[in-house]
Amino acid sequence: MTRTTAVEPRLNDALVIELAACLSADRVHTDHLERALYGRDASLMRGDAGVVCFPRTTAEVQAAVRVALRHGRAIVPRGSGTGLAGGAVPVQQPVLIVTTKMVDVEVDLANRVAWVQPGVINLDLTRQLRPLGFHFAPDPSSQQSCSLGGNVANNSGGPHCLAYGVTSAHIVAIEVVLPDGELAMLGGLGADPDGYDLRGAFVGSEGCLGIATRIAVRLTPNPPAVNTLLADFVEPAHAAAAVSAIIAAGVVPAAIEMMDQRITQAVEAFVGAGYPTDAGAILLVEVDGLPSGVAAETAIIEQVCREQGARSVRIAADEAERMLLWKGRKTAFGAVARVKPNYYLHDTVVPRTKLLDVLQQVYAIAERHELIVMNVFHAGDGNLHPLLVFDAAEPGILERVHAAGEQIVRASLEAGGVLSGEHGIGLEKQSFMAWQFTQPDLDAQARLRDAFDPHARFNPGKVLPAGSRCGDLAHLDAQHRDRLLADGVWV
């Protein structure tokens, strides 16, 4: 990928004039500051946006896509910009189609679904559904700010995906504006929609196959009883062992989250959640369901944790305490700013049985590169989130950070893991795709993408590495990383 030099679009450019006619002038932005802001997401990467558009309806999305195509411009869909892998970072000065003004929700209780536009915030949807007795189960840590369109693009997870599954398990149908501007419905409300499972192909496609404009999400009933437990351990190894032991005891909790001492201390100073700051690691474990089942599973989890060396096991006394415990976990990434201003992380997934081994390797990698690492992750399904915490102003730090990140990815894959659990590939992990996938795998993915977008206009330069159709990919990882650093795409 070559980073282009930003050119200020003129207000009388035909592209801008046509977009303004489709949407209205106040929803087509071309000023330098606006384009700079939308040139980034929550990753360490940055790019150059061309024109930034804010449609409100499906018809406006279609119109914007067709205008961009007539002018030969690439298109990047964007939601709230909370992505951590550079998936919404613009490449080739594209037309950014930002869906944050698309926030309508239609609840269909008869079919147990809600039709939502892509700009709806994840937590806002659950808040709207809760009085009706339902919620939207996927709950990423960015739940307060991430959008449903972004959740669909990255197949997001969250703490409760251990029991309830990631986003793909909760999407029934998707209305999609395809790369040629035509409209398609993928999936359907019936038990077995006709044809290929294109809904399954679209969820997790990171904006490369089209733009979701209406999403039918499955409504999950609110559980009648919930218990949230906090167990603290002297050693992270004991906490990791407890995770596997809980599952082995026949209990699949709604969530099992693990935090090591450094992140626990940062979060406690930030939120005051009541975390024990002298613990080597803590587990947050939640069970839900019928009251009798919740009580039985709570007793098993408490016993297992104590057998694995827990110093104490505390059960949240009420809803307020339960929410405070979860607030600490879900603000963990923000809390690292109390230590250093920047962080970098991967979200690889490893088998639960390899958690301890990979965790020890993560600590060793950080030590070799003289970096601070904080570990907070979805322990129940092995989804790691090691945060390398640093100050980007320190000379030479980025090279060390990226070298350490690359080694963490390799360690995870060598343990039988995969590249991403929920953050996606984007630009960040594109160079690592050949480490996990064979040439036929990559070729099949490229052909699927071509079937939707033969001219590669949607979110170009993302996910698949250059040469996915060729036989020689071994050299691309280092070259890709070096280009990103040289071109200034990495901040």
Image (cartoon, grey):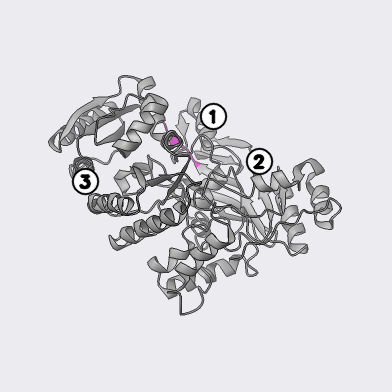
Residue contact at pointers 1 and 2, CB within 8 angstroms: no
Q: Within 10 Å of the Cα at label 3, are there few (<14), some (14-19), or many (20+) other Cα atoms? A: some
Whether residue 392 is in magenta: the answer is no
The circle drawn on residue 102 is 2
Front of the two marks 2 and 3: 3
| Amino acid at circle 2 | Met
Residue in the image at 74% along x and 65% along y: 72
Question: What residue would you read off at disc 3?
Answer: 244
- Of marks 1 and 2, which one's residue comes earlier in the chain? 2
Amino acid carrying mark 1 in the image: Gln
Mark 1 neighbour class, 10 Å CA radius: few under 14, some 14 to 19, many 20 or more: some
Compute the Cα span from label 2 to label 3. Answer: 42 Å
Q: Which residues are magenta?
A: 218-222
Image side of residue 182 versus residue 307, left or right: right
Q: Earlier in the sequence, mark 1 or mark 3?
A: 1
Place residue 402 in its image quadrant.
bottom left
Image quarter of residue 67: bottom right
Residue 263: percent from left, percent from top:
35, 37
Check disc 3 and give the amino acid type. Answer: Ser
> Regarding mark 1 in the picture, which secondary structure is present there?
helix
Q: CA distance from mark 1 to mark 3?
A: 35 Å
> Do the residues bearing badges 2 and 3 touch, measured as CB atoms within 8 Å?
no
What is the distance, in whole Å, between disc 1 and disc 2 at their CAs?
16 Å
Which residue lies under the disc numbered 1? 128
Q: Is residue 168 above or below residue 225?
A: below
From the top left corner, tell me how far across and down residue 248 is, in percent: 19, 45
Label 2: state its secondary structure.
loop
